[in-house]
Amino acid sequence: MAASARSHSHPSTAARMSFPGDDTPASAPPEIDGRNWRCIDFISDVHLCEQQPRTFEAWRHYLDTTPAQALFILGDLFEVWVGDDLLNEASSVFERSCVDALRKTARRMPVHFMCGNRDFLVGNDLMQRTGMLALQDPTLLQTSVERVLLSHGDAWCLDDHEYLAFRAEVRSATWQQAFLARPLTERLALAHDMRSASESRKRTHTPYADVDDTHATQWLRRCQADMLLHGHTHRPATHTMPEGHARWVLSDWDVDAQPPRAQVLRWHGDWSRIDLPGRL
Ligand SMILES: [Mn+2]
């Protein structure tokens, strides 16, 4: 299936972003033809939230100044997303600023959005308001040089059984309909609880599972892809894998951390990691 990445309106993939069965190697991932792009940016795990205004400002500045011809956002753009109806609330000033920044960028270049485990409830309304193009997880990108498999990465952390069970549940249409039917205040409270649980897990240094290399290799072989590019684990690295494959892991963003983290992976015939704020 060829998905035109040049089109700014893409009705076939701009649906709600839960795709039952999207993790099975049996189904061929959609493919994007990026052979005409000379500069492509990849970011993930920006974790935008009102409590981190400096990270938001760095991200907005990046969007305004990047020379990329296409942008791929590989999940967890938002720290949490409890439903697009949030955008209709008078109090959602921060979320609307995010929409404005994305819309402005999507007028200049195709902006592709894949959801992560924090923002899987992004729906049609946000996509339409921003003009972003929905990406299935995984998706294949053909650049003029190589075939790149794109994923958020959470579905491939196979050792995290508890999370995978949770993921299967929350990605089901039944769960999502029931959750979205709850009052917004209730959903926001639940999201807050989930965030606190995740923060306390980080403080206790409970190790998180990593992407399973055997599984990743199977996918790369099946798709005849050269490399896997993903986020989620917050462990930026370039891994060499069997059969000449590679696994590139994106960094998360936190401008308030020491040292600050705000990294873009850029393809311009070759690959480079660009640490912001700094050179663009
Ligand atoms: Mn994630």
Image (cartoon, helix red, strand yellow):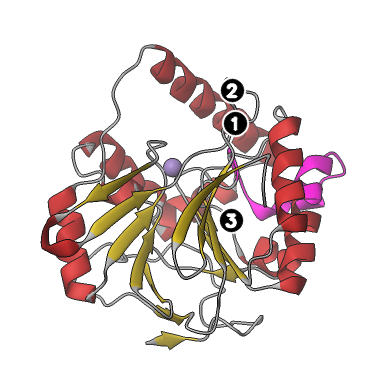
Amino acid at pointer 1? Asp
Q: Position of residue 180 (x, y in %)?
A: 58, 50
In which quadrant of the rendered view does residue 157 lie?
top left
Marks 1 & 2, CB-CB < 8 Å contact: yes
> Few, some or many C-alpha atoms within 10 Å of disc 2 (few <14, some 14-19, many ≥20)?
few
Name which residue lies at 57% across and 20% down.
Answer: 258
- Residues at marks 1 and 3, CA–CA distance in whole angstroms: 22 Å
Q: Nearer the viewer, mark 1 or mark 3?
A: 1
Name which residue lies at 40% across and 40% down.
Answer: 236
Circle 1 sits on which residue?
A: 254
Sequence-wise, the earlier of marks 1 and 3 is 3
Q: Position of residue 178 (x, y in %)?
A: 50, 50
> Few, some or many C-alpha atoms within 10 Å of disc 3 (few <14, some 14-19, many ≥20)?
many
Amino acid at pointer 3? Val
Q: Is disc 3 placed on a helix, strand or loop?
A: loop
Ligand 1 found in image quarter: top left
- Residues at marks 2 and 3, CA–CA distance in whole angstroms: 27 Å
Circle 2 sits on which residue?
A: 257
Q: Which residues are magenta?
A: 78-97
Tag shown at residue 122: 3
Q: Is disc 2 placed on a helix, strand or loop?
A: loop
Q: Is disc 1 placed on a helix, strand or loop?
A: loop
Amino acid at pointer 2? Ala
**Front-most of residues 142 and 91:** 142
Residue 111 seen from this side: no
Marks 2 & 3, CB-CB < 8 Å contact: no
Q: Is residue 153 left or right of residue 192?
A: left
Q: Residue furthest top?
A: 204
